[in-house]
Every structure is written in C-alpha cells, then in structure tokens.
C-alpha cells in the first residue's frame, strides 16, 4: 500500500518560511504606520508645549497687571516683573504691552497688560511645523488702585 506524504515544509508551528513571511509582513506594516505614529507624537508634544507657553503668558500678564494697578507703578516696572516671571519658567523674549500707562492712569481706570511671544522662539523643535509662525498672546485687565 502506498502512503502519500504531505509536504510538511510549510506546516510546522514555526517553520522558517512562515516565520520569514510574518517578519516581512510586520516590517511592511511598521513602514506604513510608523511615519503617521511619529508625526502624531511630535504633534502632541508641540501642541502640549504651545498650551504650556500660553498658560505661562496668562500668568505673566496677571503678574504684570497686579504690578500695574499698584500706586507708583510704571510701565518699566510692569515689563520687568512680567518678563522676569516668564523667564523664570523658561519662556524668554516675551513682549509686554501696558495700556494705558500705569504712571499716568487715574485711580479706578482699567489697565490691560498684554504678553505675547512668537511660537518659533519657544518651540523645542528646530523647525516647528504645526504652529510655526504663530504668535501666542494673553492679556489681563485690572482696575487701578487708589483714591481721587
């Protein structure tokens, strides 16, 4: 009686050919998914950095507004306190605008302090592609202290 043998070259649990095919399929899948995955990770990091810088600008404008509403405050004092707060948390090159001038503002006048910085100056990436060229800004408004 003749027994026909099956070809067992492709049937083993981890045959060499099957394993090579699986590795090849995994490499192709990784080549397709990896660029998208890494772009998403870089985008998340860049967006997180933008949110952090935005919050620093909000806090710095509040610090500046608190300085601006005190009696005897000047625009130079406001700018100094605002930029020193921002630079203490590693956000440099902040532009501070105070309107109206706290030195000449009458008591009860609303004073607005605006802080802004270009995202290119604070990004961790050498060439930010997600928010490159954008300007992040924040402002706070408070009432000038004192009596007439």
Image (spheres, grey):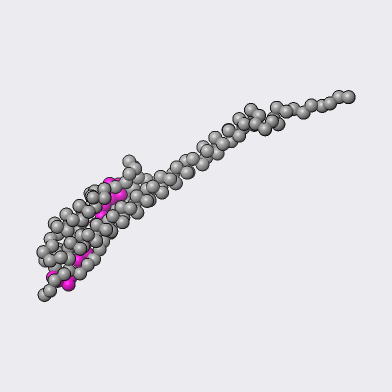
The C terminus appears in which quarter of the rendering? bottom left
Residue 100 showing in the rendered view: no
Residue drawn at the location 22% of the way across and 54% of the way down: 85
> Is residue 105 left or right of 5 when viewed as pictured?
left
* Extent of the magenta region: 106-121
Establish if 56 lies above or below 18: below
> Is residue 30 left or right of 68 when viewed as pictured?
right
From this viewpoint, which residue is outermost toward the bottom? 148
In x, y percent, where is residue 20?
Answer: 61, 30
Residue drawn at the location 13% of the way across and 71% of the way down: 146
> Is residue 41 left or right of 3 when viewed as pictured?
left
Q: Would residue 9 be counted in the magenta stretch?
A: no
Answer with the quarter of the image where residue 115 lies.
Answer: bottom left
From this viewpoint, which residue is outermost toward the top? 2
Residue 61 showing in the rendered view: yes
Residue drawn at the location 11% of the way across and 64% of the way down: 72
From this viewpoint, which residue is outermost toward the right? 1
> Is residue 30 left or right of 52 when viewed as pictured?
right
């Amino acid at each position: 009686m003749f027994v026909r043998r099956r070809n067992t070259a492709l049937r083993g649990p981890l045959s060499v050919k099957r394993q090579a095919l699986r590795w090849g399929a995994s490499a192709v899948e990784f080549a397709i998914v990896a660029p998208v995955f890494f772009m998403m990770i870089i985008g998340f990091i860049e967006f997180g950095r933008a949110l952090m810088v935005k919050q620093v600008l909000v806090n710095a404008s509040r610090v500046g507004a608190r300085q601006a509403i005190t009696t005897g405050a000047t625009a130079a004092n406001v700018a100094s306190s605002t930029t020193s707060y921002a630079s203490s948390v590693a956000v440099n090159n902040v532009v501070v605008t105070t309107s109206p001038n706290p030195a000449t503002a009458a008591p009860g006048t609303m004073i607005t302090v605006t802080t802004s910085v270009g995202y290119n100056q604070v990004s961790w990436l050498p060439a930010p592609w997600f928010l490159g060229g954008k300007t992040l800004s924040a402002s706070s408004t408070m009432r000038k202290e004192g009596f007439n």
